């Protein structure tokens, strides 16, 4: 058995932030499914929204967040996170994150603008901000003697007092599969943090890496946590459309710097959908692209920034320029083929502003959590900010908590299971689930489509759970079990919302209700919702 003061599940920006804030006085274990830098944070291109310029203000950033969130944001959460934005950026700068500089600007840094923002407030490292941040923090983590990295480990389920037959419901760590040794290990901890990211892989097309399988949401739900607003899955409007490039995001900053969306014949279409045109919030732009693709029978639309000087494009978007050029697309000369793809899970495990969930000593931080910041639609570049601010707040809460003694925890018992006979069941169900979610729970929804998805998910869930009970666990089985659970929560939440708001657009309920209401699902309890 491994024992830690704090166990962090996930090595994205939320997990790294917690680890570094805790490690001076706590023994920290950091589980990651692949290597330390493989996660959604690393792939974040655009940047981090923060109030850094004297011409900007906290109030304006909050207002932009609330507008994008379509009336469903928790204003207290938005205020707390935005008010701490400069402090979070100063911490990253002090650690050595190489943000793009601009000596002519008051702040000394280049600030870009993205959809939904009233000011240039996105600090970035060219078009690879996530990689710059996580690689810098990753070096600090690898060098820290109090942090133990457990790479190639995937958490299976939380260990709770309820499962141990003890009073209350407190988390005491996890059972995890060591993929290299192919054995389940018991990891005990006085505090456990889910920082495992979102659930983009429940859909067929996503900008997320393969690790985004809803693990933390599913584990938290099974342990007794409420989930909130799971119907709000954000589709990024502009994912590169190319047969030889999977899940490559074209950052919103391309539109922020003047990129124009066009039909194949060169016609611009966004002004017909929204007066903010290409700088409208993501839900608006994604729906507009979806509408035009369906109307004209298109495989994609085009994002054109080629009218800008070539040196400007190469300087601001070096990674996008290089990647597209490898595929034969010179973005200084021609437009970029793009389609919407699932990008961000706005809902998640319900937490307070210190990351507390409904289970004692269990925290959720980052995309796995629902603090209320994002409401019905996340404002661009607020996600990394949330990881930083709530990550620090959770660390401070843990450091102030009284000491506890760990109970006796039994090892994982797999004496009643055998090796699987037909693993094709996993690959088939994985594919069927993601296609059903894409076809029936996409950008535009109907009750009929949602019911079809629910019926298919119910059958898949029964089959997968039976398989789980009878065979040894594997990485694919653990992820598939979590994917089907998370999909079920998304569909249940969508069926409860009898309106169109933010990222949830229903043809059956095209109007927005006057009163905004969160969708909260409670394990073994009644659901409340819009």
Image (cartoon, rainbow, N blue to C red):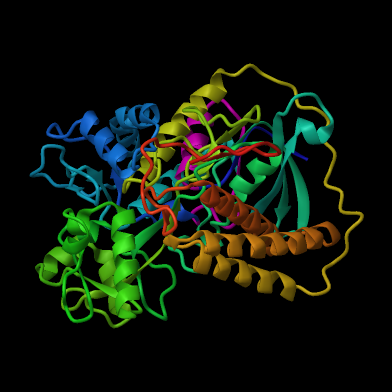
From the viewer's perspective, tell me whether residue 260 is left or right of residue 222.
left
User: Which residue sits at x=34%, y=33%?
Assistant: 88
User: Is residue 150 in view from this perspective?
Assistant: no
Q: Quadrant of residue 482?
A: bottom right
Q: Nearer the viewer, residue 141 or 109?
A: 109
Q: Position of residue 3 (x, y in %)?
A: 72, 35
Q: Is residue 466 left or right of residue 443?
A: right
Image vertical order of residue 22 relative to residue 297, above or below:
above
Residue at the spot 84% in from the left edge and 43% down from the top edge: 411
Q: Inspect the magenta stretch and tell me whether residue 251 lies in it.
A: no
- Residue 212 left/right relative to 189: left
Q: Is residue 31 above or below residue 273?
A: above
Q: Nearer the viewer, residue 124 or 421?
A: 421
Q: Position of residue 436 (x, y in %)?
A: 57, 68
15 within the magenta span = yes
State which quarter of the image contains the N terminus. Answer: top right
Q: Which residues are magenta?
A: 12-38
Give whichever of 203, 289 is nearer the camera: 289
């Amino acid at each position: 058995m491994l024992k830690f003061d704090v166990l962090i599940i996930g090595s994205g920006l939320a997990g790294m932030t917690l680890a570094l804030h805790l490690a001076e006085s706590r023994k920290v274990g950091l589980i990651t499914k692949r290597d330390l830098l493989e996660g959604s944070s690393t792939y974040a291109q655009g940047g981090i929204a923060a109030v850094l310029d004297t011409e900007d203000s906290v109030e304006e950033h909050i207002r932009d967040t609330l507008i994008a969130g379509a009336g469903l944001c928790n204003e207290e959460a938005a205020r707390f996170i935005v008010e701490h934005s400069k402090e979070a950026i100063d911490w990253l700068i002090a650690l050595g994150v190489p943000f793009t500089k601009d000596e002519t600007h008051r702040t000394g840094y280049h600030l870009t603008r993205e959809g939904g923002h009233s000011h240039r407030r996105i600090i970035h490292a060219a078009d690879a901000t996530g990689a710059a941040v996580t690689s810098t923090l990753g070096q600090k983590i690898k060098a820290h003697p109090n942090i133990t990295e457990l790479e190639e480990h995937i958490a299976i389920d939380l260990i709770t007092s309820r499962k141990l037959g003890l009073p209350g419901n407190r988390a005491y760590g996890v059972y995890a599969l060591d993929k290299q040794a192919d054995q389940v290990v018991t990891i005990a901890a006085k505090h456990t943090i889910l920082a495992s990211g979102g659930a983009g892989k429940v859909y067929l097309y996503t900008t997320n890496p393969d690790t985004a399988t809803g693990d933390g949401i599913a584990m938290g739900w099974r342990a007794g946590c409420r989930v909130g607003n799971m119907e709000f899955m954000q589709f990024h409007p502009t994912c590169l459309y190319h047969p030889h490039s999977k899940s490559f995001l074209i950052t919103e900053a391309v539109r922020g710097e003047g990129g124009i969306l066009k039909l194949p014949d060169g016609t611009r279409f966004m002004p017909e959908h929204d007066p903010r045109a290409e700088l409208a919030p993501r839900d608006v732009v994604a729906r507009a692209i979806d509408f035009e693709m369906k109307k004209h029978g298109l495989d994609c639309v085009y994002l054109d920034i080629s009218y800008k000087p070539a040196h400007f494009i190469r300087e601001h978007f070096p990674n996008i320029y290089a990647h597209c050029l490898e595929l034969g697309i010179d973005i200084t000369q021609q437009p970029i083929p793009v389609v919407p793809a699932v990008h961000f899970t706005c809902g998640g495990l319900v937490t307070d502003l210190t990351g507390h969930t409904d289970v004692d000593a269990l925290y959720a931080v980052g995309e796995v959590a629902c603090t209320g910041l994002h409401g019905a639609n996340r404002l661009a570049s607020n996600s990394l900010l949330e990881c930083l601010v709530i990550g620090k707040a959770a660390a401070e809460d843990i450091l102030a908590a009284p000491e506890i003694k760990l109970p006796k925890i039994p090892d994982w018992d797999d004496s009643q299971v055998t090796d699987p006979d037909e693993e094709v069941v996993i690959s088939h169900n994985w594919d069927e689930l993601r296609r059903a979610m894409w076809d029936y729970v996409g950008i535009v929804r109907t009750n009929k489509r949602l019911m079809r998805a629910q019926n298919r998910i119910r059958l898949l869930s029964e089959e997968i759970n039976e398989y789980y009970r009878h065979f040894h666990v594997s990485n694919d089985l653990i992820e598939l079990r979590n994917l089907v659970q998370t999909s079920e929560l998304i569909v249940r939440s969508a069926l409860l919302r009898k309106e169109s708001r933010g990222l949830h657009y229903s043809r059956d309920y095209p109007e927005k209700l006057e009163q905004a209401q969160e969708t909260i699902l409670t394990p073994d309890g009644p659901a409340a919702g819009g």
